[in-house]
Amino acid sequence: MSAPDVRDVTLVEAVNLALTWEMEHDENVVVLGEDVATNGGVFRATVGLKDKFGFKRVMDTPLAENLIAGTAIGMATQGLKPVAEFQFMGFIYAAMEQIVSHAARMRNRTRGRLHCPLVYRAPFGGGIHAPEHHSESTEALFAHIPGLRVVIPSSPSRAYGLLLAAIRNPDPVIFLEPKRIYRAVTQSVSNNGEALPLDTCFTLREGNDVTLITWGACVTETLQAADKLVEQGITAEVIDVATISPLDRETLLCSVAKTGRAVIVHEACRNGGVGAEVAASIAEGAFLDLQAPVVRVTGYDTIMPYYRNEQAYLPEVGDIVQAVEQVIAL
Amino acid sequence: MKHLHDFHVDSVCYLDDHGTPFDELPPQAEDTERTLAAYRNMVLARTFDSKAIALQRTGKCGTYPSVLGHEVIGTAIGQSLAKTDVFVPYYRDQATHILRGVSLNEMLLYWGGDERGSAWQACPEDLPIAVPIATQCCHAVGVASAIRIRGEARAVVVCVGDGGTSKGDFLESINLAGAWHLPVVFVAINNQWAISTPRGIQTGAETIAQKAIGAGLPGHIVDGNDYFATIEALDNALERARSGKGGAVIEAVTYRLGDHTTADDATRYRSAEDLREAWEKDGIKRLQNYLHMTGFWSPDREQALQAECKQIVEKAVQEYLATEAEPPTAMVDYLFDSLPTALVQQRERIAAKYRGGES
């Protein structure tokens, strides 16, 4: 089948392409959320879907996040594949009980009789000068919950392939979209309905001296740091974790076995972040390969500052370069 | 000033405390076979209940919530639901589960700490017991949305307690049911108590049923110890829902005759006098009296039914007690559709620790 390449696709447009493809090919896929139908979503991720598929499959819900999460669960038990949008991750907390106590547990609780093939999408992270509660990265909250998959794309083509995989997956997926890079770059995307694998890290760049492990918007700065490090003769392997839970430890450990050094980069707070799990996994699984301690470059253990100071919170290229210099020096 | 809206909540009761009709009974009373089946189910649920409590007291079952005082409502729900409808329970719906085909053994397994207690094959679309209060209401509107999207003539019944009606899940769900015209009937089982919190301080509203009005749904009150009032309201609401006319809220008024669960001691917060008065309104005795009065029941039949129910329950208890626990590896096996690589090692560890997964 010839793949119609779509040129100049942003990450948010790739989300839209994947939703459109899957709705065209599977009548059980429905979209629900606040402002997703007529308005096409506040970031326009669902634009055009209502016109193509109608109100029965693209539903503007009342303004109640807990209800959105729970309604999607009920739909999923009937064999629909709901893709529910939370307008911002900062508003998902009202839905935690539904996500944690029901979506994640339905298959286990019923011994496979019922399950939840659903996707909860939410834009997350800082860097777009948004109001309070619109910029946090709290992915670790979900990574801690057994029964959930937590997937974070970092490019248009991975957003397309991973969202298709998330929708087709028979279990609940938290799909967190880094809004800082919603429109940062464009790529040509093959709109051929091909999904990417879940539970798998993507090695974006090979190198021998250090492994840089990251996900989401920080992939951008991490790749830039890797470029800069070449100037110093350091080749960095860059891994986009993509599915932060369940974690593909093998890819990470294999890389660290090769490089002997690891720097983890994430925007979320350090304390109890997913970086801690990655670091512990490396300590447990590759200790003898390590030539230096594992170092983390992360946001601070503070409340996300309002936007005048958000840049001071976000990990920058220089921070990553500095961390690498530190571990190489050992 | 413009006068926009007056609201109306009806309250229905046909039988007095002794089972004597106040008035002409609804058409449901003409179906003697169904009424006798209802009575049988109530007695079976109550027999099961006292056995489950006894099992808990002797260390053979975990914490268990008594169905005492809910048997009439649960039975009416079970009878009014068609097989193709979907039931979304809370955790005191034993009488309904029996009619949906859930086995007594499965119910004991659930409260006895075994996930297989929710693997119901007889009613595969019914949702499992929901412990977090009122959360099931959101699932019910989701199921009803799927039914509406597909244009099917089916409906959903969801149960919630009077305490549960204070939660956003209930209020958000009735709101969606009104906005989307969903085929879902909310049965708010007002048993007067949310553990120790009495109905009076749960809400300032005079009735729970009137909350439906604010959501754009009709609200009805029935005496939940009056089988005819309850089954009529459910039959009507479900028929209406299946034919695309939208949902409803039915406040079924009863009294929780037992403790909240076996871990509770209701004597700490309510008087023996209140409880004695509530027992006078017991719906099972009321229906039994009615059946006696109408000539459809006799002491012999009662004795035979009690013996039959005891035997059924005893058989289920033996089956339950003889059921081995699942291998501990089961905790991994039902987490996802297929085992993620990240969990392989943990599964192996469990299996090794418990000799190949067997406890």
Image: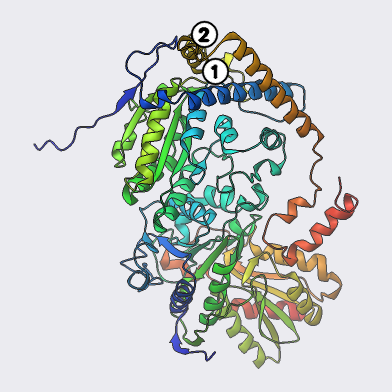
Tell whether A257 sits left or right of A47: right
A70 to A50, vertically: above or below? above
Q: Position of residue B250 (x, y in %)?
A: 38, 32
Q: In this orientation, does residue B201 appear?
A: no
Colour scheme: rainbow
Q: Position of residue B231 (x, y in %)?
A: 43, 29
Question: Horizontally, is B39 left or right of B8 in the view?
Answer: right
Q: Quadrant of residue B237?
A: top left
Location of residue B105 in the rendering, given as x and y in whole percent from the top left corner: 70, 34
For disc 2, the neighbor class at 10 Å (few under 14, some 14 to 19, many from 20) is few
**Residue named by callout 2:** B276
User: Residue A151 at x, y = what percent?
Assistant: 59, 68
In the displayed orientation, state which residue is furthest to the top. B273
Look at the numbered discs 1 and 2 and tell me whether their residues touch, using CB distance below 8 Å: no
Secondary structure at badge 1 equals: loop
Upstream in the sequence, badge 1 or badge 2?
A: 1
The correct choice, above or below, for A1 with respect to B217 in the image is: below
The residue labelled by disc 1 is: B257
Disc 2 sits on a residue from what chain? B
Q: Secondary structure at mark 2?
A: helix
- At 48% from the left and 90% from the top, the residue drawn is A5
Which residue is located at x 62 percent, y 50 percent? Answer: A105
- Is B243 displayed left or right of B104 in the figure? left
Q: Is residue B249 left or right of residue B258?
A: left
Point out the image quarter for the N terminus of chain A.
bottom right
Q: Quick check: can you spot residue B267?
A: yes
Between the C-alphas of marks 1 and 2, the distance is: 9 Å
- Image quadrant where one finds the C terminus of chain A: bottom right
Which amino acid is tagged 2? Arg
